[in-house]
Image (spheres, rainbow, N blue to C red):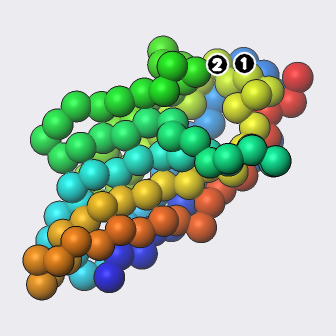
Amino acid sequence: QVQLAESGGGLVQAGGSLRLSCVASGSFRTIDFMGWYRQAPGKQRELVATKTRGGPVYYADFVRGRFTIAVDDAKTFILQMNSLLPEDTADYYCYVDATSTDNTREKSWGQGTQVTVSS
């Protein structure tokens, strides 16, 4: 089973930066896909960026050029957010699709970390 723990959210002024981390723990062989999603108050959860193991990175249009997704090691995933805008205010969640030690697929969400950007 994969557990995810996010950190790094907070309050920042527009134009500032934040670095979100997501650490995976538990019993798994590989993280095959990971993503960052966000949900603003009163809105649906939306995809921010994704990374496939050994594959490409994808960014939503509204963050391309400002946010960067990276893998720090096999278990730590980073979302570097620069040039933040008030509309980036949301709860940010990491998500993984992993291969368990028994070779089954496992999907897991983190608990979320709050990002608030003031104007």
Amino acid on which disc 1 is placed: Gly
Residue 25 sits in which quadrant? Answer: bottom left
Q: Which residue shows up at 52% across the image and 65% down it?
A: 110
Percent across and percent down for residue 27 are 25, 81
Q: Which residue shows up at 75% across the image and 44% down it?
A: 43
Percent across and percent down for residue 63 are 54, 23
Q: Secondary structure at mark 2?
A: loop
Quarter placement of the N terminus:
bottom left
Q: Secondary structure at mark 1?
A: loop
Q: Earlier in the sequence, mark 2 or mark 1?
A: 1
For residue 37, above or below residue 60: below
Residue 32 sits in which quadrant? Answer: bottom left
Q: For the residues labelled 2 and 1, say whether their Cβ atoms are less than 8 Å apart.
A: yes
Residue 49 visible in the current orientation: yes
Q: Which residue shows up at 44% across the image and 36% down it?
A: 49
Amino acid on which disc 2 is placed: Ser
